[in-house]
Amino acid sequence: MQKKISTSRREILRLRARVVAVERACLAALNLVLRLRPEELNQNIETSRRLLEEGYQDVEFSPDLADGAERKFLAAEVEKSMRSLQAELGFKGGVSQPEEG
């Protein structure tokens, strides 16, 4: 017997599905850019990674995160995700991460 999924849980699952779809679409676009301008792509990813990591630690960048521990956690997650992306695209500085669904 299947359990009925609550409305709030459905919303979380929809958001999760959307994130996965957006990630895959972005990866496809990045693979295309990788073929056209690999040096620029690497530079842009590295710059974005650094700016996001630093930004999420700044209260003004993420005013909805009042807790310093949450900002630090988010900065670390952004760093990990961007490094994983770099690894997947074959760039120096990338760090492979196991894929999670």
Image (cartoon, helix red, strand yellow):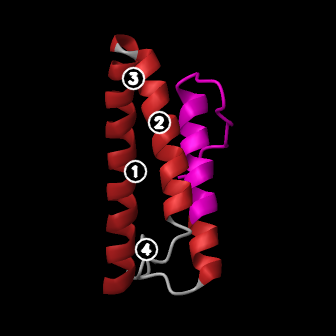
Q: In 3D space, how far apart are the residues under numbered discs 2 and 3 (Cα atoms)?
A: 13 Å
28 or 41: nearer the viewer: 41
- In the rendered structure, which amino acid carries the disc numbered 1? Val
Q: Which residue is mark 3?
A: 31
| Magenta residues (range) | 75-101
Q: CA distance from mark 1 to mark 3?
A: 16 Å
> Which amino acid, by three-letter code, is at mark 4?
Ser
> Label 4 near label 1: C-beta < 8 Å?
no
Q: Which mark is drawn over residue 20?
A: 1
Q: What residue sits 56% from the left and 48% below the top?
A: 81
Q: Which residue is mark 4?
A: 62
Mark 2 or mark 3, which has the lower sequence index?
3
**Disc 3, SS:** helix
Which residue lies at the image location 34% right of the left edge and 21% below the top edge? 33
Residue 6 shows in this picture:
no
Query: Residue 92 in the image: x percent, y percent?
Result: 64, 24
Q: Position of residue 28 (x, y in %)?
A: 35, 29
Relative to 28, say whether 76 is above or below: below
Camera-nearest label, 2 or 3? 2
- Label 2 SS: helix
First in sequence: mark 2 or mark 1? 1
Which circle, 1 or 4, is nearer the viewer?
Answer: 4
Which of labels 1 and 3 is toward the front? 3
User: Quadrant location of residue 19?
Assistant: bottom left
Left-right relation of 25 to 59: left
- Whether residue 87 is visible, yes or no, is yes
- Labelled pair 2, 1 in contact (Cβ < 8 Å): no
Tell me the amino acid under the disc marked 3.
Asn
- Indicate yes or no whether the magenta region holds residue 84: yes
Percent x, y of residue 85: 53, 37
Residue identifier under label 2: 45
